[in-house]
Amino acid sequence: MATKTEEKVEKYILDFKEKIEKDLDVDLLRKVTKACGPSIFNSDAETISGSSASVLETVKKNFLVKKLGLKDDEKLDVGLNSVLEKYGKSNRNKYRPIVYYLLAKYFKKENHFN
């Protein structure tokens, strides 16, 4: 029987393949999902609002700067916008693990999840 985390990963895989592309590093997505911790089990925290400046600022500070160790500059906004564009601006439910996965890929920081 699949764990609750594994059930979430399966849901994210389907969402990714449906909305973004078929090419997915499932192992990396699994690691990113685990790194999100219990937030994925809270419906509010599980998703990211691409239209909320405060939410995007939090993603930038807590994930890109603190977790991935990136410098806080305009490249972060460019990367964030690129990822949100790829996931679909009109797509209201952007799952946090997928956004983080795409950001890790965009900034070539996959090694942070090894």
Image (spheres, rainbow, N blue to C red):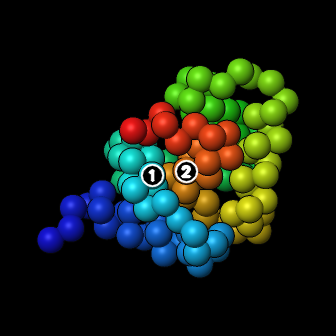
Q: Please tell me whether residue 71 is drawn above or below residue 34 in the rendered image.
A: above
Give left or right: position of 8 versus 110.
left
Residue shown at 21% from the left, 61% from the top = 3
Distance, label 1 to label 2, CA atoms, is 7 Å
Graded by Cα atoms within 10 Å as few (under 14), some (14 to 19) or many (20 or more), the crowding at tag 2 reads many
| Residue 18: mark in rendering | none
Q: Nearer the viewer, mark 1 or mark 2?
A: 1
Which amino acid, mark 1?
A: Leu
Q: Please tell me whether residue 67 is drawn above or below residue 40 in the rendered image.
A: above
Foreground: 98 or 89? Answer: 98
Q: Position of residue 54 (x, y in %)?
A: 71, 36
Graded by Cα atoms within 10 Å as few (under 14), some (14 to 19) or many (20 or more), the crowding at tag 1 reads some
Q: Secondary structure at mark 2?
A: helix
Q: Which residue bears the numbered disc 1?
A: 28
Q: Please tell me whether residue 18 is drawn above or below residue 85 in the rendered image.
A: below
Quadrant placement of the C terminus: top left
The reply to whether callout 1 and callout 2 are in contact (CB within 8 Å) is yes
Q: Position of residue 35 (x, y in %)?
A: 40, 41
* Quadrant in the rendering for residue 84: bottom right
Q: Which residue bears the numbered disc 2?
A: 101
Residue shown at 15% from the left, 71% from the top = 1
Which amino acid, mark 2?
A: Tyr
Give left or right: position of 62 versus 73.
left
Q: Position of residue 88 (x, y in %)?
A: 74, 66
Q: Earlier in the sequence, mark 1 or mark 2?
A: 1
Q: Is residue 55 visible?
A: no
